Amino acid sequence: MPRPPSSKSFRVFKLSSPNGKREWKIEGRPTGKRERYYFVTEKEAKNAARNLNDQIAAFGTKTSLTDSQRVMAAECLEMLPMLKASTRRCTSTGIIWTGKPAPSL
């Protein structure tokens, strides 16, 4: 029997059997595979769930970026209006300048 569809967002749960000192967990399926994280306090769990859900809302779940890559992407997006160009155009122009073939999409 197939599992019912679940939400990609993270939810907070109090554990009936604590995991050591960790009485709270967050659980979600942002990429389809279940992810769980355990916390000592409810406040920590709620903050972590909020942060992860904000990341999912802002960036989706298809691409996983490090913090430095997110900062770089945001800086590049801020430069686009100055260049009067789209992200795709800048990327393809960069590939032409480097002489490397464009990867297949």
Image: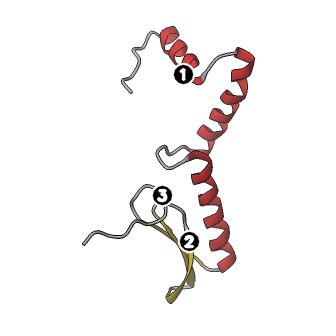
* Residue type marked 2: Arg
Which residue type does callout 1 highlight?
Arg
**Extreme residue toward the right, this view:** 82
The mark that comes first in sequence, 2 or 1, is: 2
Left or right: 5 in relation to 18: left
- Residue nearer the viewer, 40 or 28: 28
Residue drawn at x 44%, y 66% as measured from the top left = 6
CB under 8 Å between discs 2 and 1 = no
**Residue 97, image x and y in percent?**
52, 9
Q: In the rendered image, which residue does mark 3 sit on?
A: 30
Q: Which residue is mark 1?
A: 88
Looking at the image, is 63 positioned above or below residue 18? above
Q: Quadrant of residue 74?
A: top right
Residue at 54% x, 15% y is 94
Q: Nearer the viewer, residue 42 or 19?
A: 42
Report the residue marked by disc 2.
Answer: 11
* Residue closest to the far left: 1
Tag 2 or tag 3, which sits nearer the N-term?
A: 2
Q: Amino acid at mark 3?
A: Pro
